Image (tube, helix red, strand yellow):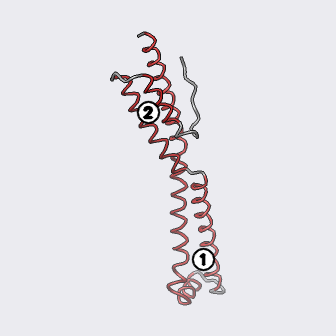
Amino acid sequence: MGDDVDVRLELIRRIEARRASINAFLRRVRPRSVRLANISIVSSALAAFFTAGPAFGGVTFTDAVQRGISLPDSSIVWRTLCLLATLVSLVAAVSVHLNKSQETASQLSAAEACNTELEGLQTFLEFAQFPVHDAVELYQKYITKIPFVEEVPVNP
């Protein structure tokens, strides 16, 4: 009986340590993912903004801007807007692909799901007569879903 209690407590400690490492991963990765998504959205909107004037207003728009800011040639207006649109489109594309290439969204989802599963398992171990050997199997099953989360060593 004492061995079963010791094993149960050890498993609970391991679950707590694993959940701490998952939470650290989420705190580190989630803001970066959000930042890249926001950069992509804003950059795409700016690209649309920079091309809207010449696209809808045509020569009338570029001539009006040229006169408004005293430029020698109206082609400077559309060339500048096209250059700006190109640059922010490039920023949008790079930020989207950085986020996708690192599989950030799927990793965040898997880590959050695993954290929830481990929380449930911990609750079962703490409050229910759940067999320890079954709990160990579930623990192993859950953590295989998050090989990208660095494990924090268990403190005795």
35 lies above or below 52 = above
Q: Residue 91, position in %: x, y?
A: 61, 63
The residue located at (55%, 55%) in the rendering is: 36
Q: Quadrant of the N terminus?
A: top left
* Residue 95 found in image quarter: bottom right
Q: Which label sits on residue 118?
A: 2
Residue type, label 2: Leu
Q: Residue 156, position in %: x, y?
A: 53, 17
Label 1: state its secondary structure.
helix
Mark 1 vs mark 2, CA separation in Å: 52 Å
Q: Nearer the viewer, residue 35 or 93?
A: 93
The residue located at (45%, 18%) in the rendering is: 9
Residue type, label 1: Leu
The residue located at (48%, 36%) in the rendering is: 142
Q: Nearer the viewer, residue 98 or 122?
A: 122
* Residue 93 found in image quarter: bottom right
Q: Which residue is mark 1?
A: 81
145 lies above or below 71 = above
Q: Residue furthest bottom?
A: 60
Q: Nearer the viewer, mark 1 or mark 2?
A: 2
Label 2: state its secondary structure.
helix
Q: Residue 99, position in %: x, y?
A: 57, 54
The residue located at (62%, 72%) in the rendering is: 86
Q: Residue 51, position in %: x, y?
A: 55, 78
Q: Residues within 10 Å of mark 2 (few under 14, many from 20)?
A: many
CB within 8 Å, label 1 to label 2: no
Q: Residue furthest left?
A: 128
Q: Which label sits on residue 93?
A: none
Say which label, 1 or 2, has the lower sequence index.
1
7 lies above or below 52 = above
